[in-house]
């Protein structure tokens, strides 16, 4: 797993399927995404999450929203050794009335279940939790304003009980002028926080922690 910034990650499966989540556009002040991949997942159609034209190669784009209705859709798709499925949710706590809908992407490969929450804007219901199922790794927005804030993100993590939590969508040196919070509030008081010391980490079922850890990338 490599953190590209904002809500974008590169994941590479054992079968060498290269996945980029929520690629951002040129007006997002992280280093430009200019990499080859096989699959791009798009949780919703905002410019900082759907800039698939930045990607190289023969990219299969998996969009979580119906292009006509703008509603989040359920689907399941297998690409190589990776199974993708979506769980509909909202970009706000008002049933999508403020910011629209959002798709949670559940990705399974090599015995791992990796969940990307996109721009989740609310706590998860019992139905969401059941539909997502057991989780190994979750990427969760924590910066607030556009998404859930640190407090709600902690609730979401407690409800999913993952082994690894990767915070995303928070203020960094690249987004210092944005009205979102830094990661500090989310990790404050958490017992198991690991500073990765870079932007890349190896994900394997056998080396994941037994108790939930928060992995913070150095961006």
Image: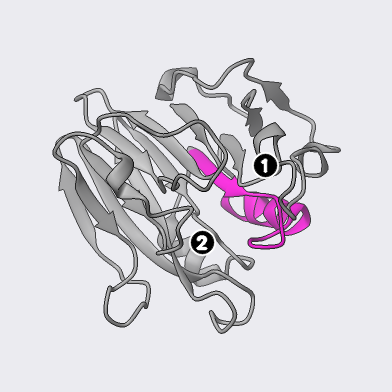
Q: Earlier in the sequence, mark 2 or mark 1?
A: 2
- Determine which of the numbered discs, if any, sits on residue 175 in the image: 1
Q: Is residue 198 magenta?
A: no
Left or right of 130: which side holds 73? Answer: left
Image spot of residue 216 (x, y percent): 65, 29
- Is 98 rendered above or below residue 189? below
- Determine which of the numbered discs, if any, sits on residue 129 in the image: 2
In this view of the protein, which residue sits in the foreground, 212 or 179?
179
Residue at 79% across, 31% down: 191
Answer few, some or many: residues within 10 Å of disc 2's Cα (few below 14, many 20 plus, some between 14 and 19): some
Q: Is residue 145 magenta?
A: yes
- Is 64 rendered above or below residue 138? below
Residue at 41% across, 58% down: 43
In this view of the protein, which residue sits in the foreground, 156 or 104?
104
In this view of the protein, which residue sits in the foreground, 57 or 116?
57
Q: Nearer the viewer, mark 2 or mark 1?
A: 1
User: Which residue is most to the front?
Assistant: 27
State which region is magenta: 137-160
- Indicate the quadrant containing the C terminus: top left, top right, bottom left or bottom right: top right
Secondary element under disc 2, as helix, strand or loop, is: helix
Colour scheme in use = one colour
- Determine which of the numbered discs, if any, sits on residue 57 in the image: none
- Is 107 rendered above or below residue 56? below
- Indicate the quadrant containing the N terminus: top left, top right, bottom left or bottom right: top left
- Is 176 rendered above or below residue 121? above
Secondary element under disc 1, as helix, strand or loop, is: helix
Image spot of residue 58 (x, y percent): 13, 39
Find the distance from the CA under tag 2 to the CA under tag 1.
31 Å
In this view of the protein, which residue sits in the foreground, 1 or 68?
68
Residue at 64% across, 34% down: 212
Q: What is the quadrant of residue 109 in the picture? A: top left
Residue at 49% across, 19% down: 201
């Amino acid at each position: 797993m490599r953190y590209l910034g904002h809500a974008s990650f590169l994941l590479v499966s054992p079968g060498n399927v290269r996945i980029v989540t929520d690629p951002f556009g040129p007006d997002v002040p992280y280093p430009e995404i200019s990499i080859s991949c096989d699959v791009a997942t798009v949780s919703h159609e905002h410019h900082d999450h759907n800039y698939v034209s930045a990607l190289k190669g023969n990219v299969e784009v998996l969009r979580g929203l119906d292009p006509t209705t703008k509603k989040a859709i359920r689907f399941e798709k297998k690409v190589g050794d990776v199974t993708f499925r979506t769980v509909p949710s909202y970009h706000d706590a008002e049933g999508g009335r403020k910011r629209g809908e959002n798709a949670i992407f559940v990705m399974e490969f090599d015995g791992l279940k990796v969940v990307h929450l996109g721009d989740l804007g609310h706590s998860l219901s019992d139905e969401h939790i059941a539909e997502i199922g057991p989780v190994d790794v979750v990427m969760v927005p924590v910066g607030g304003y556009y998404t859930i804030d640190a407090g709600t993100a902690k609730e979401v993590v407690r409800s999913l009980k993952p082994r690894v939590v990767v915070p995303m969508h928070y203020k960094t040196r690249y987004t210092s002028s944005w009205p979102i919070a830094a990661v500090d509030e989310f990790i404050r008081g958490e017992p198991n926080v690991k500073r990765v010391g870079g932007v890349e980490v190896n994900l394997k079922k056998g080396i994941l922690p037994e108790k939930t850890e928060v992995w913070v990338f150095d961006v």
